[in-house]
């Protein structure tokens, strides 16, 4: 370690006095001006991680759906997964070390994680379109150079594109080519192969309006447009040329507000969707002829994909274990539909993609989605090998064709992480193949009315939860109050948990009717009361 270089460079990226930040659900997130020392140090950490696992590590500069003034950074592990939890702790230690302790903390991490500093290191960097992202990614490079590692700066990419690149690199190209062209070619080829079998579904069905949240998704979709076949015609809105990132638009806005984004003119029954700021989430929606807005969220996306995959799996007649993974925020009727009508096992895990991803890895086919539209499908190595073998060797036509569709699904889905572009193509292919309109898809089940609120409390850590965050252990008395309340309403469910990304407590409630006036109001009151809030 070149101590002189470390001292010199870290002085160029000073830590503001008294500032502590934590590597949370989605890395570090804060106001952009507080992050320079953090990204520099994450450059250092990426080198250590790369040396520890002898593989390329990714660093993405983005704050996803947060306001434009914010920014953030997250590390990507070798196969495109989120950073391993044991290293989240190192990330927090390194981020919060005072300048004079920096070398000591690095040495400690090297000892604990058995990092051999003499090994080679390589890092892939990506960033979103925020005004602050370019400069921050330059600071990442400073960190990388201090500890002496190779890097490739992909510049502007979506978060899932960077995850894809890292996975390609570390599988020596088995997952695909680690270039943007490689990504576009892989997805468009699989998509075209898939929809070959769809019967022409009419001019209207071809069109899709996409709200890109004024973010990176717009740039990358435009680049990808030439690769799209004529069966899909996309119309890009909120492309970042006029309005601010995530302002009154994007997947998070549409999901939380349960209303259409600004900047997208929606005619009755038109199929529309929204990406979030770094294009790893997607939700669909439409307006009916009476002008009512219908949201099709991550739960309904998971349901559509599960129906399609289950049918194909039945045709290939293999003993593959399939399951859906959700969080507590999944609408109760989606869980009921999946379990009771579709007869697919459903598992509930803690909020945050890493928990869903981890659980989904237990199955041959693991479909996971957060209600907010972040999700993907994981295929086990065994399932993938078997499917590819059936495509080559199976004599029975129906079985071989089903295997072929599954193979194309494997190639179309970004298995490293939720990906708005890839998920959109998966959905468009399924709708075309099944000849479903957006209304028919929506009508699979009816969402229970629900509300998601956030409240600020003096210290959100007073709330401790269990049972995949569905029950509060502390403060004393809170769960009892919630239990008593939900008993009063049919199909009702409510829970309270501290957010992992913001300094707020989230309150969720659903019931068959009038949830806003009923459960939500009262749960909110008790949470406020029992956590001794500042405001509510
Ligand atoms: C209710 C909700 O949407 N929570 C989001 C949000 O987490 P919180 O821990 O609830 O702040 O941000 C996470 C990261 O983007 C995302 O994975 C998660 O789904
Ligand atoms: Mg995102």
Image (tube, grey):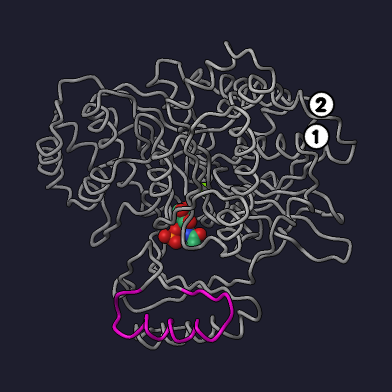
Between 112 and 297, the one lying in front of the other is 297
Rounded to the nearest angstrom, the CA distance separating label 1 from label 2 is 7 Å
Quadrant position of residue 517: bottom right
Above or below, 133 relative to 451: above
Element marked by disc 1: strand
Residue 122 at x, y percent in the picture: 32, 23
Q: Which residue is label 1 attached to?
A: 233
Residue at image position (35%, 38%) is: 139
Quarter where residue 41 is shown: top left
At 43% from the left and 82% from the top, the residue drawn is: 482
Measured along the vertical axis of the image, is residue 155 above or below residue 193?
Answer: below
Q: Nearer the viewer, residue 442 or 252?
A: 442
Dot 1 and dot 2 residues touching (CB under 8 Å): yes
As drawn, the label of residue 230 is: 2
Neighbour tally class for label 2: few under 14, some 14-19, many 20 plus, Cα within 10 Å: few
Q: Quadrant of residue 433?
A: top right
Does residue 70 show up? no
In this rendering, is residue 488 above or below 509? Answer: below
Q: Is residue 47 left or right of residue 391?
A: left
Horizontal side of residue 508 vs 91, given as left or right: right
Percent across and percent down for residue 135 are 43, 40
Find the magenta span and give its range: 472-494
Q: Position of residue 504 (x, y in %)?
A: 42, 70
Q: Quadrant of the N terminus?
A: top left
Between residue 242 and residue 52, name the one nearer to us.
52
């Amino acid at each position: 370690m070149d101590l002189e270089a470390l001292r010199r460079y870290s002085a160029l990226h000073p830590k503001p006095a008294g500032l502590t930040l934590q590597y949370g659900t989605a890395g570090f997130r804060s106001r952009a001006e507080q992050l320079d020392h953090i990204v520099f140090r994450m450059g250092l950490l990426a080198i250590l991680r790369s040396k520890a696992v002898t593989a390329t590590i990714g660093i993405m500069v983005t704050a996803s759906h947060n306001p434009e003034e914010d920014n953030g950074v997250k590390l990507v592990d070798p196969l495109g997964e989120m950073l391993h939890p044991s290293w989240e702790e190192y990330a927090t230690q390194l981020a919060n070390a005072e300048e004079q302790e920096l070398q000591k903390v690095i040495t400690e991490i090297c000892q604990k994680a058995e990092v051999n500093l003499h090994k080679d290191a390589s890092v892939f960097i990506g960033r979103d379109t925020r005004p602050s992202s370019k400069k921050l990614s330059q600071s990442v490079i400073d960190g990388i150079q201090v500890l002496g590692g190779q890097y490739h700066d992909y510049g502007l990419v979506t978060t899932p594109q960077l995850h894809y690149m890292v996975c390609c690199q570390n599988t020596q190209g088995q997952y695909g080519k680690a270039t943007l062209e490689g990504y576009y070619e892989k997805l468009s080829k699989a998509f075209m192969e898939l929809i070959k079998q769809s019967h022409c579904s009419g001019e209207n069905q071809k069109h899709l309006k996409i709200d890109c949240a004024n973010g990176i998704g717009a740039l990358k979709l435009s680049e990808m447009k030439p690769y799209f076949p004529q069966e899909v015609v996309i119309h890009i809105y909120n492309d970042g040329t006029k309005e601010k990132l995530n302002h009154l638009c994007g997947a998070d806005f549409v999901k939380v507000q349960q209303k259409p984004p600004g900047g997208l003119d929606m005619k009755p029954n038109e199929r529309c969707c929204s990406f979030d700021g770094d294009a790893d989430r997607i939700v669909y929606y439409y307006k009916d002829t009476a002008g009512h807005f219908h949201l099709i969220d991550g739960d309904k996306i998971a349901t559509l994909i599960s129906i399609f995959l289950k049918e194909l799996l039945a045709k290939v007649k293999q003993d593959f274990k399939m399951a859906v993974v959700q969080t507590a925020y999944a609408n109760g009727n989606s869980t009921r539909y999946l379990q009771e009508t579709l007869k697919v096992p459903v598992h509930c895990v803690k909020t945050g993609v890493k928990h869903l991803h981890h659980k989904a890895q237990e199955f041959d086919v693991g479909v996971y989605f957060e209600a907010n539209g972040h999700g993907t499908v994981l295929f086990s190595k065994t399932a993938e090998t078997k499917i590819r073998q059936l495509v080559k060797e199976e004599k029975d036509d129906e079985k071989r064709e089903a295997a072929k569709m599954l193979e194309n699904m494997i190639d179309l889905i970004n298995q490293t992480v939720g990906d708005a572009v890839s998920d959109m193509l998966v959905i468009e292919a399924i709708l075309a193949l099944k000849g479903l309109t957006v209304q028919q898809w929506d009508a699979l089940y009816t969402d229970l009315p629900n509300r998601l609120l956030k409240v600020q409390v003096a210290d959100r850590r007073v709330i401790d939860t269990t049972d995949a965050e569905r029950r509060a252990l502390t403060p004393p008395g809170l769960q009892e109050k919630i239990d008593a309340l939900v008993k009063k309403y049919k199909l009702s469910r409510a829970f309270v948990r501290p957010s992992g990304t913001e300094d707020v407590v989230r309150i969720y409630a659903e019931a068959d009717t009038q949830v806003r006036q009923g459960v939500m109001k009262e749960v909110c009151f008790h949470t406020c009361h029992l956590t001794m809030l500042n405001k509510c």
